[in-house]
Structures are given as C-alpha cells and as structure tokens.
Amino acid sequence: MIRSFRWIAWSALSLFLVFCAAPLKGQLGNSGSIDGVVKDPSGATVPNAKVEISNPVTGYRRQTTTDNDGIFHFSNIPFNPYHLTVAAGGFASSAQDVDVRSTVPANVPITLMVGAAETSVTVEASGPDLIENDPSFHTDVDTTLTERLPLESQSSAVSSLVTLASPGVVADSNGLFHGLGDHAENSFSVDGQPITDQQSKVFSNQIPLDSIQSIEAVSGGPPAEYGDKTSLVIKVTTRSGLGVTKPTGSIFTSYGSFGSVSGGFRLAYGGKKWGNFIAANGLNTSRFLDPPELHAIHDKGNEENFFDRVDYQITGADTIHTNFQYTRSWFQTPNTIDNLNIGVNDPITGNPLPAQDQRAKINTFNIAPVWTRLISPTTLFTLGAFVRRDVFDYYPSRNVFADGTGFIPGGSSATLNQHRTLTNAGLRSDVSYVKGANNIKAGVTFQHTFLTENFNFGITDSNFLASLGCPNGNPAPDPCAVLPPFDLTAGGTLFPFRGHTDVKELAFYGQDTITEGNWAFNLGLRIDLYRGIVHDWQPEPRLGVAYNIKKTNTVLRVSYSRVLETPFNENLILSSVGAANPVVLDVIGGSSLQAPLRSGQRNQFNAGFQQAFGKFVVVDADYLWKFTHNAFDFSTFANTPIFFPISWRSSKIDGPSVRVSMPNYHGFTAFAVLAHVRARYFPPQIAGLGTSITTTAGEVFRIDHDQAFNQTTHFQYQPWLKLPWVAFNWRYDSGLVASNPSLDNFADASGFLDADQQTAIGLFCVDAGGITHTATLTTALTPTSCGPNPTSSDAKLLNIAGPTFDLDHNPTRVKPRNLFDVSVGDDNLFQGDRHRWSLRFTVINLTNKTAVYNFLSTFSGTHFVTPRAYTAELGFHF
C-alpha cells in the first residue's frame, strides 16, 4: 500500500511537471467564468456594449464592455445563479439568467434587437432570481457584506464572518466555531485546495479576509468532492487581478480599543492574459486572545499576513494560477488574577514568584499552483499541487515555577514547552464536463501530512506527588517510582516527549448534478483511504434531490451523505500512542490507557426548502440528522495548554437551521440566521488519552458545544451612494454547556472554585434572612456561607442546574447573552472619481454586555466575550 501511494504521488507530480514545461481559459475550483459574443440581428458583432451580471441575494455585481469583436468575458465568478443584462446604443436591452456551477466556462451568445437606445440598465430582483434549485443547503457571502459587517475579531476575521453569516454555527472563543453541533468539524476549500486542519488562532493562522472575494458555506449534504470534516464546508474564492488593466487597490490603517493598531494594503493589477492580486496587513493589540478575566491581563499579540495570487493565461486553453500565503502570529497566554502569583514564593529560592509569562508563536506558509486546460467547450481538466506548513511553538515562563504551583483549583501543576509542526503536501486533479442536463466532475486527491510533536514537561507543585499518594521517603511503586525524576521542586529535570509520524490520504470521487425540468439531482460517490497510525477506508455515497415549484417560487430538497471523518492532526501522536509512555500515563491517570484514534463513520440526512416571497424576501430552511460512530472531541494534558483529540462511542446531532435574506431594496439589505442544534454524545470514551469528563456508566451527555438556540440579525442601509452607510448586528446565544463536573450545584461550585473564579461568574446565594452574599476577590463563598439551606443560589454568568441537574436534559450552561455591534462609514468622503478616501467607525458589544463564551471548559478553560470596543479605520482607494 505504501508503494502504491508513492507511485501515485510521483506519477501525478511527474505529469504536473511535464505539462508545466509545455505551453500551458479555465478557473479555479470554486469559481467559474462567463464568455459571450454580442451580435445584432444581421449577425454583425456589437462593440462597446455594456454587460452586467448580478446576484440579488449576495449583492454580487460585475460590469464590463464588449471589445471590437463584440466579445465579453467575466472570470473568477463564484458558483451561483446570475442575472445577465446587455445594453447598447440603438438596441433594446437584453436580459437572461445564467447559472454558474462549474469551472467549465459558461458560453452565452446574445443577439440584440433594434430598438430605442439604452444608456442604463436597471436590475430588479424577482422571485425566480432569488431561489436556487440546489439539493444542498448553503449560504453565500460576498464582499458587499464582508466589507461592512462589524466583526468581533480582527485576528480571526474569517471565523467571525462565518459565525455571524451562516446558520447553525456556535460561537466559541479565540476564533473557534462549531459547525452544526460538531467540534471544529469544518473544512476550507480555498480555490479548490482542501484544508481540513483546525483554523482557530491557537492552532493555526487563517487565510486573511482581505484576500477573499466570496464564501459559500455548505451546511447541507456535502458533494462527493469534499471529505474528511464536512459538518461545514467553507468554499473560498480569492480575489484576482486578471483583466485589471489599470492598477486598483487600497491602503488602510485603523486604531481602536486595547491599543489595537492595524494597517495594510490591497493591490490588483494585470492585463487581459495575466493578473496579480496582493493583500498584506498587520495587527498589534493588547487583547489578542479572549482572556479568562473580564479585563485582559498579559494578552498582547501581533499578526502579519501576506497573500499573493498570480494568474497567467498562456494560451487560449491553458491557464496557471498560484496562491501564496505567509502568516506569522505571536501572542501571550492571558493570565487570571491567580496567575499573577500574588503572595506565592519560589519553592527553591523562597523569593516571591513573578506572574506567569507563557507565550506562543505560529508560522504558516502555503503555496498552491494550479494548471487548467480547456479540452473542449464542454470539458475542463485541472491539476494542482499544494504545500501548507504550520509551525507552532509554545514558550514557558522564564521562571518555570510561575507556571503552576497547584494553589488554583483545577489549575496546572506543571510547566511545559512545545514545538509542533504540521506539513500538508498534496496533489489534486479533476475533470469537469458540462453538457445538456449534466454537470459531471470526477477527480482524485492525494495528501501526505507530516506531523512532529516535541514537548518538555516538569512538575512545579511540591504537593503534586503527595496528592497521588507518594509521601516523601516512602515511594509507592507506580506512579511514585516514575514521576519523581521530573519533580522540579526536588531538583528533577524536564521530561521529554518526542513523536513523529506521517498520514497519507487518497480520495477518489465522481459526481453528477443533473438538471431536468423542475428537478435537480446530485449523485455522487467518494472513496477515502486513510493511512496514519491506524488504517481506514470507506465508500461514501452522496445523494440529493431538489424540486422547483415555479408557480410558488418554492424549492423542496432532501439529501443523504455517508462520510468518513478523519482524526484531528493536532497532537494526534500524543493522544494515540502517548499512553505507552509510563510518565504520560501516570500524569493523565493510570486507568487512561486507550486505543489509537480511528476514523469516524457518519450517516447524515438533510431535508429542507427555499421559499421566495415576491422580490423582497427569501427563506431557506434545513433540518439535519447526523449519526456518528466514533465521535471526536478534545481534552487537555494535565490542565496544560496541550490539547489532544479523543473519541467517544457515538454521537447524535440534529436540529433546524434557517436563513432569511432580504435583497437590496432602496438601499436597505438584511439577513437573519437562526438555529437550534442538539449535540448528544454517548460514552464510553474509546480512543485517545483519558479525558477529565466523567459520566455515570453509559449516561448520555451534552457536549460543551451544544447550544439550544442562536441567531444573528444583520442589516445595512445606505439611502444614496453619496451618503454614509450604517450596518448593525444583533447576536443572541442561549449559552454553551459548562462541561466541568464540579458545577452541578451551588454546594459543589462554592466548594470547588476559588475566590477569583467565583467572582468571575458572579456566584451568589441568599440566606434565610434574605441577605445576598456574593463572592469577591478576597472572600470566597463556601457551601455554608448562606446556611445549610439557602433560599436561592446561582451565578450571574452561569445557569447552575442545581437539584434538577442532568447531563443530558438539564446541564449547567453559560447564561444567554445579547450582543449588539454597529458600523458607520463613508466610502467616498470627498466624492472623488479615480481616488477615494473612506472612513469607518465600528463599535463591538455596543451595550458593554458582560458575558463568557465558556467557563472552566475541559478543552479550553474560561473566556470572556469582548467588552465594548471602538475602532476607527481610514482608507485610501485608487
């Protein structure tokens, strides 16, 4: 099998090099093109005709003019239906609909009839223009939204955009989002390049938002070309400079709360046969991550992004595209008040300990060349390669004893450093064929991922071994015979963990989208072969049906998908084989020996509809059922920042998602996304190192990304183009599950949490005399602070379940929150023509709501949402 993989990889690479050496009009994986010739009734071509395409739902709009031969061309068009209009002097205007669903260029011949001269074209949406006869539920987002939508995070703007704009996405801290009830089971397809590793800013660096032209977030049944992690498939089309004969771009800078300073530029330039688009930006802030305290402590960070896309059309049939990206981020690990080590002494010297000073750095590099050959007007061949590399470094405090002394309940008792690399290299090739009712695509993808995990670990709490039953001078056999050499308080040294492995993945797929009358069918089959620490393979049928009831502007759809979910790569070696090391086993817990992680098997069912109401509103709704055997989750290594994947026996996730869109009406646009997703997991844990989640044998529990309800409402208004615009968000989250088992009731919470943690959530109780007792930084509540039977008790930021606590039906949750954001801007301050100045002012969390994403999560700890934050941005556009 290994020889077969090598043969396929080298053969594909050799083929790629041969073609590149030869002379090389197709598009990248997530975009198409529209070509056409405009003629008059006699067949003569019409030069200088105005051609426009638009999509009223996304707001996408492009214009061009025909050349001397009457030819027009639109490139890099996101997959969507478009309304195409043509106008020329002395002719009546012409309009028709064009559905772009393939990388094969759409050829649109147009004949203009002689009539009154047209000087302008007015496009109005209608019911048929608003709906798509597509069996898969998805959300389209264009730059008309991204350039004005108030986003919470500058350093993970893509995550913020997807969370706000796509239904069923649960917001979590640090740029992490959970698509439709799953933990980070999201994949990106950037111009066809698959990226299935985690994109949270504590794991990797995302593609910069400046580089994105449009996003299609597929939350329904995934087509066969997408595998691995498919709860949410985020198809990204990047910006291009192809055809931009006059350089265009912008330079911008901003300043805001927390000393946040950013700046950058975008530049597109090229010609008819080549183009280059560059985006570069940088950010420096004192609130880089979401901190565990309301006020950020030790939370500085910076990020630098560079993205470059080069397009070159060598012949009329051959085109080369290449994406480059380099991103570097450096950030501190935010401290709690406890991490300041006030009143704590160094166990060796006896001197006062400084505050904790842990930091991290991530370098991300990506290059992805793609060659496309238009074999015929109906057939396009694509061959692409890619290399993406993440280098993650975690640094301890300069005084290692500042990293953990054990005085924090549930806190770390250790120091560590880590160097982790993930290199993903691969080849992909596909053939697209469009003719008549058929839109066929067949392809193969090979990926080779190289993983290296190195970390050093040392015990910094002099009481840690005693807590395991290892009294001084009387060591027990195990773990007391294994861990003492790594007790730094007794002169020990750091324990080294070293791991390296590689993962090979090979996927074959074929799919056909058949449109016949009012019917649309998605028929596909995918076969995945996974060769990592374990070996798995699976055939995966994908079926979808949609029916368009044209009289009522209604689309009904249903789909089934079988998916092989591959394990997370981050710290996969530690989780899968680490338990074979006695030190790792004893730190986690002696009974924690588990099997290596295998792939998960999922059956997914979707049913939904799309309904247009006149030309003003379109409603898109979907209900999903996902049944997964071997369901993935994460845990932590000894309460340190090392997160590793685990898996449970199975999971069941279901719930409705709705998106309501209102196209532009006299300058007003709006949308709302709503979802209710249940995420239930079934023990026992079957793979990975042990987890800190404990359940009664066989008891079903809600995972900590289960949320009963969330919604986002957004609107933009600009009455006239020469006036400023305003954009507004209202986000409601009913609250994630607080998975820590010590928060079931007031007695447990007050007995387990220290003063700082109690104060953070506003823990309180009311005694028999009606007096309210609230925790403070200097006074922690105890189970008896309000007597043996307090009349009430709870927390301001948590809904503590109390006597009715149930892991499945009534877990402790973060309290609901309503957050409001607003932006006001002017895109042309001085009404310039060629050169424009813009000014934008944004307020995040307008009402200054105090809330948390999560509290003492077994995966990521505690994180507060952003308090009220202001940002002003000035831009120059040319």
Image (cartoon, rainbow, N blue to C red):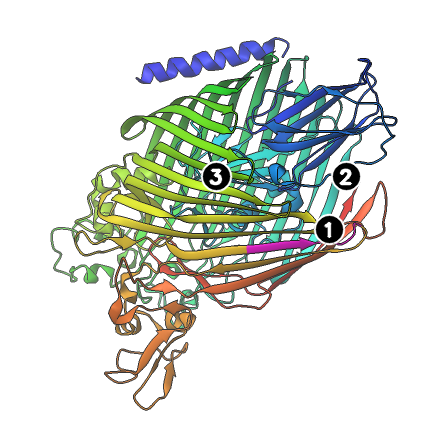
- Asked if the stretch drawn in magenta spans residue 714, the answer is yes
> Please, what secondary structure does the residue beneath circle 3 have?
loop
Seen from the viewer's position, the closer of residues 307 and 272 is 272
Q: Nearer the viewer, mark 3 or mark 2?
A: 2
* Image spot of residue 589 (x, y percent): 21, 51
* Image spot of residue 764 (x, y percent): 37, 78
Q: In the image, 578: left or right of 286?
A: left
User: Which is nearer the N-term, disc 1 or disc 2?
Assistant: 2
Label 3 and label 2: CA atoms lie apart by 30 Å
Q: In the image, 845: left or right of 357?
A: right
Please tell me which residue is depicted at 30% across the width and 34% down the height of the picture. 599
Mark 3 crowd level (few <14, some 14–19, many ≥20, 10 Å Cα) = many
User: Which is nearer the N-term, disc 1 or disc 3?
Assistant: 3
Label 1 and label 2: CA atoms lie apart by 13 Å
Q: Which residues are magenta?
A: 713-721
Residues at circles 1 and 3 in contact by the CB criterion of under 8 Å: no
Residues at circles 3 and 2 in contact by the CB criterion of under 8 Å: no
> Please, what secondary structure does the residue beneath circle 1 have?
loop
Q: Residue 103 appears in which quarter of the rendering? A: top right
Q: Which residue is mark 1?
A: 666
Q: Which mark is residue 137?
A: 3
Q: Which residue is mark 2?
A: 122
> Is residue 692 visible in the rendered structure shown here?
no
Residue type at tag 1: His
* Image spot of residue 842 (x, y percent): 66, 58
